[in-house]
Image (cartoon, rainbow, N blue to C red):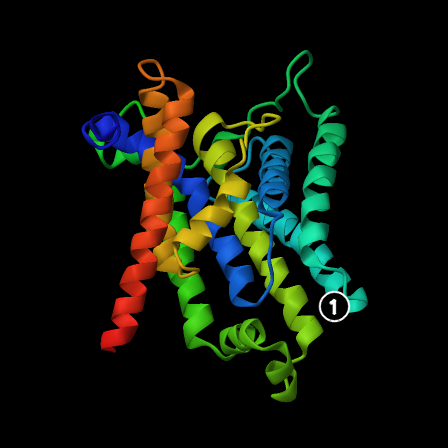
Amino acid sequence: MLRETLGTGYGIGQTLFKATPLIFTGLAVAFGFRAGLFNIGAEGQLYLGAFAAALVGVAWKDGPFPLLLVLCLAAAAGAGALWGAIPGWLKARFGAHEVINTIMLNFIAFALVSYLGHGHFVPATVHTAEIGAGAHIPRLSALLPALKGSPANFTLALGVVLAVWVGFVLFRTRRGFEWRTLGLSPGAAEYGGVAVGRAQVGALALSGAIAGLGGANFVLGYKHFFELGFSGGVGFLGIAVALLGRNHPLGVVLAALVFGVLGHGGLAINARVPRELVNILEALVILSAIGIAAVAERRLRKFA
């Protein structure tokens, strides 16, 4: 598995491509966790974000680079933010639990995109027309020729920059302090003057925007069109990525790379070993990583 993933330039590129959307969905889930909110809707938010980006890219096909690219990214973030803000508002207004709401909104997102997409899909297909060239995100192979042939693209760099920004917001700003206080103790946050309802809506909207941007990896950096069912569960995997990364932006990036190795490695060896064995191996690696991380954290606290 390691030889097929990290032993060749193509394998490394495929691993980075698999890890890229997981950075976004992992960050989205981790951000919600930090504010005391369990966002299980990253799958639907990413799905809607990708569809919105494709709609803008198709509607203004002749738009120039990088203006069209920026508009597509803004559309993806906006769609994700809107879909994240809905359960935030329901929780702040009615006390509705965000776990149930975000799960249900995943199904609504799939149905809504399927319904809206029929007017934009190429006849007899399940994908939209191609977006304009001005919205294409370049491949990493343009900078690193060894990755040629792989779909890894500069959405990865966007994800890393986003992780740095999330870390800055959470740990270096007043609003981030309020969100973290809210996650630790809503009562203490309210006593300290935090507008709890507004903070919850803002946190889930930002979490959704981060997940929505993850759709750029497939639509703007790889296929250059939206395709039904493209996400393949990366939103749900983001929960595991966030937990493995201890809800820290740096940890999320590292955990996404681990899942990228497992994802591409599983496909690479699938022809030689049963799929069930690959799944067992992936589960054992993840459980081992979680156990090692927990032990290391406990020992670090002991010596601190």
| Residue 147 as seen in the image, left or right of residue 67 | left
Residue at left offset 30%, top offset 60%: 295
User: Which residue sits furthest top?
Assistant: 124
Q: Residue 188 occupies which quadrant of the picture?
A: bottom right
The local secondary structure at tag 1 comes to helix
| Residue 237 as seen in the image, left or right of residue 255 | right
Query: Looking at the rendering, in which quadrant would you find the C terminus?
Result: bottom left
Marker count (numbered): 1
Residue at left offset 53%, top offset 62%: 33
Looking at the picture, how far across and down is residue 290, in whole percent?
Answer: 36, 51
Query: Looking at the rendering, in which quadrant would you find the N terminus?
Result: top left
Residue at left offset 58%, top offset 29%: 226
Q: Is residue 138 visible?
A: no
How crowded pointer 1 is (Cα within 10 Å; few <14, some 14-19, many 20+) is rated as some
Pick whichever, 131 or 86, lies toward us: 86
Looking at the picture, how far across and down is residue 25, in whole percent?
Answer: 50, 47
| Residue 191 as seen in the image, left or right of residue 242 | right
Q: Residue 195 occupies which quadrant of the picture?
A: bottom right
Q: Residue 15 occupies which quadrant of the picture?
A: top left
| Residue 205 as seen in the image, left or right of residue 141 | right
Q: Which residue is mark 1?
A: 92
Looking at the picture, how far across and down is residue 90, in whole percent?
Answer: 77, 61
User: Which residue sits furthest bottom?
Assistant: 192
Q: Is residue 97 above or below residue 156?
A: below
Q: Is residue 255 visible?
A: yes
Looking at the picture, how far across and down is residue 63, in whole percent?
Answer: 55, 37
Pick whichever, 193 or 136, lies toward us: 193
Pick whichever, 220 or 91, lies toward us: 91
- Amino acid type at circle 1 is Ala
Residue at left offset 68%, top offset 11%: 124
Pick whichever, 133 or 80, lies toward us: 80
